[in-house]
Image: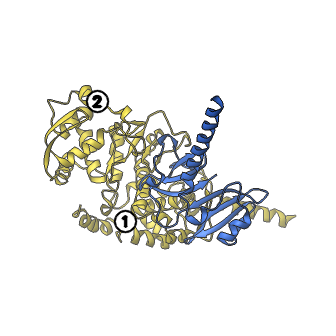
Chain colours: A yellow, B blue
Amino acid sequence: MKKFIMAFLVWGQLSYALDETPLIQCDHDHSRPSTIDKLLQWFSSEDDEIMNAPCKSKILPTEYEMMDFIDSKTKGSVKNSKIHGVKFVKEKSELLDAYRDIVTAKDSYGIAENKENQRKLQSEYEINPECQKVLCSLEKVWGREYAIKMLYIKLKYGFNVSEFAFDNASRFKLDELNDVLLALEDIPSHFLPLGSGNRPLIHFERGKNLGTYKEKTLANAVVMIFDYWDLESRPKRQYTIFHEMAHNISSHLDQMDRSPEWLDLSGWIKKGDNWERSGSGCFVSDYSKVNPWEDFAESVSKYRYNGKAFKSQCPRKYEFIKKKVFKNIEYLSNESCSTELKENAKHL
Amino acid sequence: MRCLLIILSLILGTQQAFASSEKIKTLLPSPLHSFELHKSKISEVEKELGPAELKEKQAHYWSRGGLKYALKITFDNDGVLKSIDYTFTEKWPELKKLGKIDIKKIVPYPLNGKSAGRFLLYKEKEGEVLIDPVTKTIQSVKLL
């Protein structure tokens, strides 16, 4: 009988440790070893780890820096143009292209144009004759700070944050846009512009969610951000954006999250709609155990925000991400990342 | 005349359904084209693909291009083909291969998580296509 009770207790402890469902963190539960606490987090990094990560962007670029960047990217020819009723005179062609993307209505995924939803900004905001330049026109609609950040994000990162460009989009609040921008600034420069081709990065219509999602869904890789994201801490909001960017990085790298090498690292096997793990793969968070692409996005995020722990916890995966994704830039200390980051930034 | 119209609409309706079904089916790699849902038998499938590498009840699995198990085929109790689920392993076909798509038939691919992953689902009556919106490519095709 004693043996039976002992076996039952041992089994109970093991099944607790191996449980794959997210555990509710309980600060006063001292019975769980701290290492298991760390291993069973839903996301790979905690708020303090994110904010203290080496080379983490904590300060937003200044207006001067953003304008400087915009100028550097718009050195092509100038021309007159008319876009959805707004006339432009002697404007740079790159800015006209950006403006067209920002104000042309498309479906939520940015696949097809949606003429029914096309806004008539000239009649709504009386842009001409006062404004005949792109930045001035954007300022009329969004205000100067928002307009510059919107244009900077479009030209530097290739993402379109305009709520007029995609169905079911709401305008970001300024503090939300700042978190988006800070997260984007953490992307290694060799991937920029990551979202080339007018990719959406929108706050989904407030008060609404996509039917098939759970109410607590924060975001997706399309990229759509949902109300629940607004309630997260600022580090976690930035982490979420970076996580979605990591999905985009995978697509950028020829679907790296589905490469045989990546699948082998964790022993991923596909069975119809389900992904199963075989063997003894090392995972950085509970969320990374869902499927290979969440595994990839979480690993890239862990590498960026919690590199030291990742290196000691999953050395093989760490090396893979280091070589294949980050071109050997490491985020173990400010010294290890700052030199290479600066060097890379020169090539932007 | 009325009878003629009914016959005509039936023919056209069938053709439309066929075209829609074919639209998704043609995305599958050629060895799978010859199979017909609710007609082909296990023996015919195995003759073409060889024996399944894994069998779990009515689901049979084959690996493709190093991906375990990129191809899942299910059969009903009589051993007749019920569904095909194929995941592309190397170059993913471009979304435009689907032809003109109805944007209303695209839905997000749900996940049980806080983030919702990177794929969208294109749903037709005859099957589903998993889309990567970033690269505008097709990841997998399911014929139902």
Depth check: A75 or A303 in front?
A75
Q: Quadrant of residue B61?
A: bottom right
Residue depicted at 33% across the width and 48% down the height: A198
Q: Quadrant of the C terminus of chain A?
A: bottom left
**Residue at the right extreme?**
A1
Dot 1 lies on which element? loop
In the picture shown, does residue A116 fall above or below A42?
above
Could one spot residue A49 in this view of the protein?
Answer: no
Drawn side of residue A153 relative to residue A265, left or right: left
Above or below — where is A325 with respect to A136?
A: below
Question: Which chain letter matches label 2?
Answer: A
Q: Nearer the viewer, residue A316 or A200?
A: A200
Q: Which residue is mark 2?
A: A120
Q: Residue at x 25, y 45 (%)?
A: A98
Q: Residues within 10 Å of mark 1 (few under 14, many from 20)?
A: many
- Disc 1 target residue: A331
Position of residue A202 relative to residue A301, above or below, is above
Residue A111 in sight in this render: yes
Residue type, mark 2 in image:
Lys
